[in-house]
Amino acid sequence: MRFGIHMPQKGGFARNVKRAVEIGCQTLQVFVGNPTSWNPPLPKPEELVQRGELLREHSIFPLIVHTAYLVNLAAAKEEFYQKSRLLFRKTLQNACNLGSAYLVLHVGSHGGRGYKKGMELFISTLKEEMEDWPSSDIELLLENTAGGGTSMGGTFISIGNIIKALGDDAPLGLCLDTAHAWAAGYDFSTGEGLKKAMDELNEHVGLERVKAIHANDSATPRGSHRDRHAHLGEGYIGDEGFKEFFSYPWPENLPVILETPEIGSKWDAINLSKLHLYSGEPRVVKRGIEEDG
Ligand SMILES: [Zn+2]
Ligand SMILES: [Zn+2]
């Protein structure tokens, strides 16, 4: 497995990469532009290409881009739907310029129209987007949600249905968020619970489609359908729960990203060391950027 963080935006890209390398990140997830704005000022394409090169120089891979939270490809309101598609396309293009391997997208919200209608729109939209997918080097990863309210994608069955509808050759995988899965009701903190969750995942999605993990503890109880992240070991999943989760034979180079609170603080190194502890993977000490070359 390769461990990393969702990189903060404050403080500049190069400085944050330097810090990430110093605390031992092997992979990173980023936003491109402000994730809460429909029309964020964005770096120029050349700038994005340079950023991608900087990451490669420091053996940070794979790079993952997370779409803005505003994007809802199942939006009930036409205005939001059109804005979402526009921002999704822009983000996809920017992710390509960065040389990102994956673009993470939350399965949308049906906005009160009902699950069936919302899911139909989400699937038909993805079909259209994938007709002129910009590059075979980038894959879309659907992130499982906590499944609260009108949000879709809280179960592996629902994500499996989307993948089936788009076909085996679609550039599509799953980004498994542990806090969301927990809040959605999956219990992987015991041998029995883990087996049940993974049986469902294997049957409907397939382990080979799991391309990234978001490792977050959950500040809300299992089945609460509320999405609140906690530091590893400090939430309802806990140290023992994560040890069980990481005992599963996950693919060797699977990227594992922290989206824990206070990202950019001393907590990143603490949470990273927890990942090494749970997984038994040795900690690789990296050289800082200044010492490089
Ligand atoms: Zn997410
Ligand atoms: Zn996540």
Image (cartoon, rainbow, N blue to C red):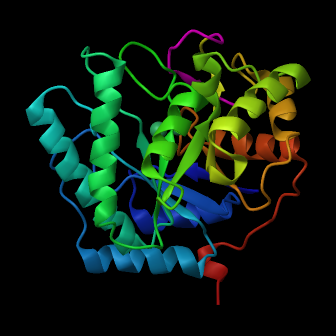
Q: Residue at x 17, y 37 (%)?
A: 81
Instruction: Locate residue 201: give its quadrant.
Output: top right
Q: Quadrant of the C terminus?
A: bottom right
Q: Quadrant of the N terminus?
A: bottom right
Taking the image as shown, residue 2 lies to the left or right of residue 193, namely: left
Q: Which residues are magenta?
A: 221-232
Decide whether the magenta segment is chiefly helix, strand or loop.
loop
Question: Does 102 appear in magenta?
Answer: no
| Residue 69 visible in image | no
**218 in relation to 208, above or below:** above
Question: What x and y, as percent, mark residue 77?
Answer: 13, 27
Question: Residue lying farthest left?
Answer: 79
| Residue 152 visible in image | yes
Instruction: Locate residue 178: give its quadrant.
Output: top right
Q: Residue at x 33, y 71 (%)?
A: 134
Question: Does 224 appear in magenta?
Answer: yes
Question: What x and y, as percent, mark residue 54?
Answer: 49, 77
Instruction: Locate residue 51: give its quadrant.
Output: bottom left
Depth check: give the residue in front, 13 or 51: 51
Q: Residue at x 50, y 45 (%)?
A: 163
Q: Residue at x 29, y 43 (%)?
A: 124
Depth check: give the residue in front, 176 or 285: 176
Taking the image as shown, residue 39 lies to the left or right of residue 268, namely: left
Depth check: give the residue in front, 195 or 21: 195
Question: What x and y, as percent, mark residue 262?
Answer: 53, 35
Depth check: give the residue in front, 206 or 228: 206
